[in-house]
Image: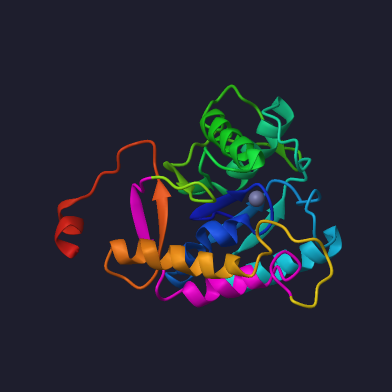
Amino acid sequence: MNLDALVFAAHPDDAELGMGGTIANIAKSNFTVGLIDITQGEMSTRGSLDIRKKESNAAADILKTSIRENLLISDGDIQLSDENIRKVVVVIRKYIPKVIFAPYFNDRHPDHISASNLVKKAFFVSGLEKYETSFEGERQAAYRPEKLFYYMQTYSFSPSFIIDISNSFDEKLNSVKAFATQFHDPDSDEPDTFISQPEFIDYVEARAKYYGFHIGKKYGEPFYCEEHIELDISQIFSA
Ligand SMILES: [Zn+2]
């Protein structure tokens, strides 16, 4: 299956928080998007692996992703090892996405930084003919996506561009809330975490409004690209 975009996340719920509106928007615009969770989030304070898997599937349904897979790399220990690089390369070569998305490379959570570095390395290596991988017994062809874009987690950056998510903010919020065990629940007796504070969902909305305002829209999501992005003449005048 060829996909237009592939989104990598260190933990289930990261992609929804960072770019859930854009994922829903890609699917609504008749492009295909897949979600690859690098770990199962087994180090999470709240919830269980089984519940989190159900929550992940529900969130993917809300965003209408074509696939959601898990690389089963150890949570809290995302090493830049050949074994892990190979796992990421195999999915890139399997889905041949035009663009891939990864967590921004500086963040509060060390796993997000490690995930970012892992995807960047695999993005490059995937294009090397001499880096051999196979999937289901078949040798895979070398392939490098056109672009690697980074989405924002806790730490902010000056965006390279902002995607209007005014028509998909509801899906973003619903996909985040699908991870019920991770966020605020007044009836839960599990320990509080950074993201389970009642103010966290307000913060998600405030940030979407903040970036939306920068482009004259109700809600937006910011992205960073290390390379410069070309605009053609029609794009200059379409604004
Ligand atoms: Zn995370």
Name the quarter where the N terminus is drawn. Answer: bottom right
Question: Measured along the vertical axis of the image, is residue 236 above or below residue 24?
Answer: above
Dividing the picture into quadrants, the one containing residue 53 is: bottom right
Identified at 75% across, 35% down, the residue is 77
Residue 7, x across and y down, in percent: 56, 52
Question: Measured along the vertical axis of the image, is residue 235 above or below residue 116?
Answer: below
Position of residue 137 in the picture relative to residue 162 (left or right): right
The residue range painted magenta reads 158-185
Residue 31, x across and y down, in percent: 46, 64
Residue 131, x across and y down, in percent: 61, 25
Dividing the picture into quadrants, the one containing residue 113 is: top right
Q: Is residue 166 magenta?
A: yes
Question: Measured along the vertical axis of the image, is residue 110 above or below residue 209?
Answer: above
Residue 126, x across and y down, in percent: 56, 33
Q: Nearer the viewer, residue 224 or 86?
A: 224
Identified at 23% across, 49% down, the residue is 231
Q: Is residue 164 visible?
A: no
Position of residue 31 in the picture relative to residue 109 (left or right): left
Identified at 35% across, 36% down, the residue is 227
